[in-house]
Image (cartoon, rainbow, N blue to C red):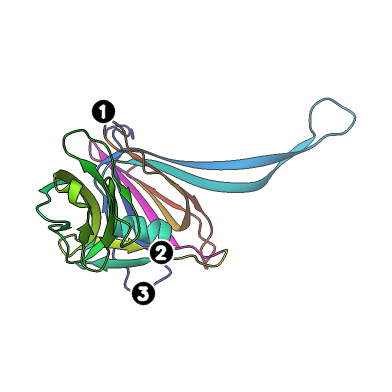
C-alpha cells in the first residue's frame, strides 16, 4: 500500500444548501485551493513563567481558491444569490463599429435592444465627439435616441465615424442580476474538495459555508484568475467538516 500523499489541486464542487433542488457546480480550472482550520488557545498562568494549563478557545474554518474558468451559476450560488437568467441573453458592448454617415442620422447595427451610447469617435483622427440633447447638434456634437439606437449629427459630421454602444443580446447563455439585499443575507453552500493521487483518496467536505471575497482581475498579458474566499461553520446538526482518506 502506498503512503497517503496528495499531488495536485483535485476537484472543487459547491452546492447551494439554502434552496431546494440546487444544482452542484464543479469548477474545472483551479490553480490552487486551501482550507485552513485555525484555533485560538487560552493559557492559565500563575506566578510561574509557563502556563499550568492550555485550553482551546474559538475556532474558524476558512477557504480560498484561485479559479480561472468563470461559471455563472457557481458565482451566483456561492456569492451573490441573485437572479440567474439562463439562456435569456445579457448586455454586450459593440466596440468601434464603423459607419460613414450619409445623412445627419445613423442607426447602429444592433439598434434592436439598444441600451446606451458608449462614445463616438472620428475614424480619421480618433478624436471623440460630445453627446448633447436633441436639437443641440453641431459640429463635434451629437444626440442619440436610446429607444431606436439612432444617432443625429450636424451636416459637417457626415464623415466616417466609429460607434461604441451597449445593447441587450439574446445570444448569451447567462446573466446574473444582483440586487441590494438586507444585511445578513447570503447564499449558503456546501464545499467538497476531492483529491485522488496514486489510488489514495483525500476528500474534505464542509456542509455549511458562506463566501467572503470574490475578485475579477483583468490583466493585459495574462489570464484572469479570480480569488474566491469563504468561511465555514456548523450546520443544523452541529457538523462542521468531514475528512475522508484511503488510509
Marks 2 and 1 close (CB-CB < 8 Å): no
Q: Secondary structure at mark 2?
A: loop
- Badge 2, how many Cα within 10 Å: few under 14, some, many 20+? many
Marks 1 and 3, how far apart at CA: 42 Å
Marks 2 and 3 close (CB-CB < 8 Å): no
Q: In percent of the image, x 53 and y 59: which residue is there?
A: 234
- Badge 3, how many Cα within 10 Å: few under 14, some, many 20+? few
Q: Position of residue 57 (x, y in %)?
A: 68, 46
Task: Say which residue label 3 marks.
Answer: 20
Does the segment drawn in magenta span residue 198? yes
Q: Position of residue 217 (x, y in %)?
A: 36, 39
Task: Give the quadrant of the N terminus.
Answer: top left
Residue nearest the viewer, comparing 218 with 230: 218
Outermost residue to the bottom: 20
For residue 15, which quarter of the picture? bottom left
Task: Say which residue label 2 marks.
Answer: 81
Residue nearest the viewer, comparing 141 with 234: 141
User: Disc 2 or 3, which lies upstream in sequence?
Assistant: 3
Q: Secondary structure at mark 3?
A: loop
Does the segment drawn in magenta span residue 180? no
Where are the magenta residues, as a range? 184-202
Say whether residue 168 is visible: yes
Task: Say which residue label 1 marks.
Answer: 221
Outermost residue to the top: 49
Amino acid at each position: 500500500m502506498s503512503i497517503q500523499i496528495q499531488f495536485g489541486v483535485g476537484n472543487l464542487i459547491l452546492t447551494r444548501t439554502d434552496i431546494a433542488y440546487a444544482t452542484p457546480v464543479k469548477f474545472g480550472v483551479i490553480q490552487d485551493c486551501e482550507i485552513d482550520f485555525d484555533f485560538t488557545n487560552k493559557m492559565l498562568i500563575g506566578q510561574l513563567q509557563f502556563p499550568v494549563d492550555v485550553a482551546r478557545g474559538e475556532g474558524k474554518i476558512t477557504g480560498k481558491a484561485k479559479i480561472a474558468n468563470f461559471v455563472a451559476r457557481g458565482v451566483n450560488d456561492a456569492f451573490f444569490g441573485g437572479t440567474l437568467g439562463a439562456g435569456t441573453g445579457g448586455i454586450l458592448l459593440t466596440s468601434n463599429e464603423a459607419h460613414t454617415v450619409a445623412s445627419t442620422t445613423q442607426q447602429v447595427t444592433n439598434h434592436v435592444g439598444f441600451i446606451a451610447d458608449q462614445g463616438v469617435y472620428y475614424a480619421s483622427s480618433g478624436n471623440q465627439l460630445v453627446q448633447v440633447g436633441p436639437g443641440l447638434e453641431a459640429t463635434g456634437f451629437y444626440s442619440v435616441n436610446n429607444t431606436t439606437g439612432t444617432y443625429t449629427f450636424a451636416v459637417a459630421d457626415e464623415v466616417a465615424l466609429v460607434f461604441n454602444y451597449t445593447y441587450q443580446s439574446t445570444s448569451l447563455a447567462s446573466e446574473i442580476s444582483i440586487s441590494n439585499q438586507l444585511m445578513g443575507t447570503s447564499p449558503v453552500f456546501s464545499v467538497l474538495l476531492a483529491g485522488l493521487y496514486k489510488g489514495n483518496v483525500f476528500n474534505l467536505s464542509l456542509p455549511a459555508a458562506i463566501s467572503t471575497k470574490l475578485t475579477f482581475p483583468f490583466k493585459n498579458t495574462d489570464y484572469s484568475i479570480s480569488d474566491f474566499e469563504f468561511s465555514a461553520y456548523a450546520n443544523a446538526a452541529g457538523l462542521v467538516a468531514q475528512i475522508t482518506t484511503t488510509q
